[in-house]
Image (cartoon, grey):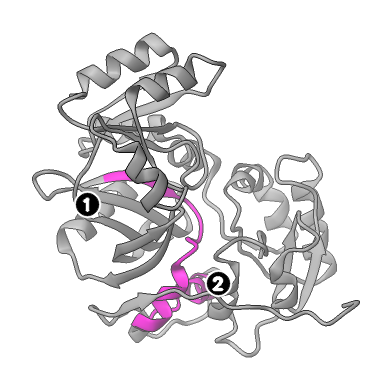
Amino acid sequence: MTGAGAPGAAGIIQCLRQDSDMRILGVDANAAASGQWLTDTFYTIPDAEHPDCIPTILQLAIQNDIQVILPLVTKELQHFAHYADEFKSAGVKLLCSSAQALGIANDKATLYQHLLQHGISVPSFQVVNSLSQFEVAMQDLGYPHLPVCFKPSVSNGSRGFRIIKEDIDELDLLFRHKPNQVYISAERIVEILASGTWPELLVCEYLPGDEYSIDCIVMPGKAHVIVPRKRTRITQGISTAGVFEHHIQIIDYCQQILDAIPGLYGNIGIQVKMDTEHKPQILEINPRVQGTIVAGLGAGMNLPLISVYAAMGLPVPASAYQPVWGTQFVRVWKEIFIPPNA
């Protein structure tokens, strides 16, 4: 498992530990990654962008008789896809989508345009590369009468995401909220963008409804699992409370999205939000295990373990695909205590 120090790593390891016969080798570019005290074996590897990263993982897999690679780091995925044949030749199953599918899923502008071409609804949006385009896009999408939002076309988590709103009370944000708010004024964001260079941005209509994170498992030619959970509390982009809902409209919408992107494989996450007409609209796709996937354990679904079993050709009982709808979850902090000189 890569990304052993990721925020969701401990929960994913907890899922895998439900099989007492499973041996877990964790890797991370951070030598102090928390997952090293939760896995059976741990190695420090080069950063995801380093040319030696994937070859190092492949060599570790061969040396340690690893059967399945479960990637957690978005930046590694495209590199894994380019080494797919090498992993296959080594007899290692790689839970990673194809390079073509990743090229669509990991670029939000490409994703939205692709889905539109397949007749699938997406939020109103414009792709911008200059300050003048940004200002025009804000007006075209209804600002200042309506809030708008933006995010880099290629980004991880909530990095670069902001909501532009006219009636921001900055004094209230300063003294009554923690410094992780996503609201910003038009004047301030124009000032920031004018100060230097920045990546391509996707400027979108603001969706006012409930937000959902959907955990999916896709195996060749078929989506085996589509499980929506409402995000009732979000802290710095991570779900910290929610409830599993049997939302047929969202399930059907996600099925259309998955069908439109051939080459997706393994655990796939989809984020949607409800629009003014209470219809789901996509925010993004995470073509990997999602950080809050451990919540599925409480609803009777061990989604990381299902995908590992499926990759290995092991039987999965039908009951494993039946979540207990209505299950709620709340996430809490948990410590790892490390003895001196460990």
Residue 47 visible from this viewpoint: yes
| Residue 2 in which image quadrant | bottom right
Give the percent coordinates (x, y) of residue 99.
55, 40
Residue 261 visible from this viewpoint: no
Nearer to the camera, 42 or 65 = 42
Give the percent coordinates (x, y) of residue 338.
78, 79
Horizontal placement of 250 versus 97: left or right? left
Please give the label number shown on residue 293. none
Looking at the rendered structure, the kind of residue marked 2 is: Ile
Looking at the rendered structure, the kind of residue marked 1 is: Tyr
280 above or below 311?
Answer: above
Q: Give the residue furthest to the right.
A: 341
Residue to which mark 1 is pinned? 253
Residue to which mark 2 is pinned? 12
| Residue 109 in which image quadrant | top left
Say which residue appears at 44% left-offset and 53% top-offset. Answer: 178
Horizontal placement of 157 versus 113: left or right? right
Q: Give the residue furthest to the bottom.
A: 20
Of badges 1 and 2, the one in the foreground is 2
Name the image quarter holding the N terminus.
Answer: bottom right
Name the image quarter holding the C terminus.
Answer: bottom right
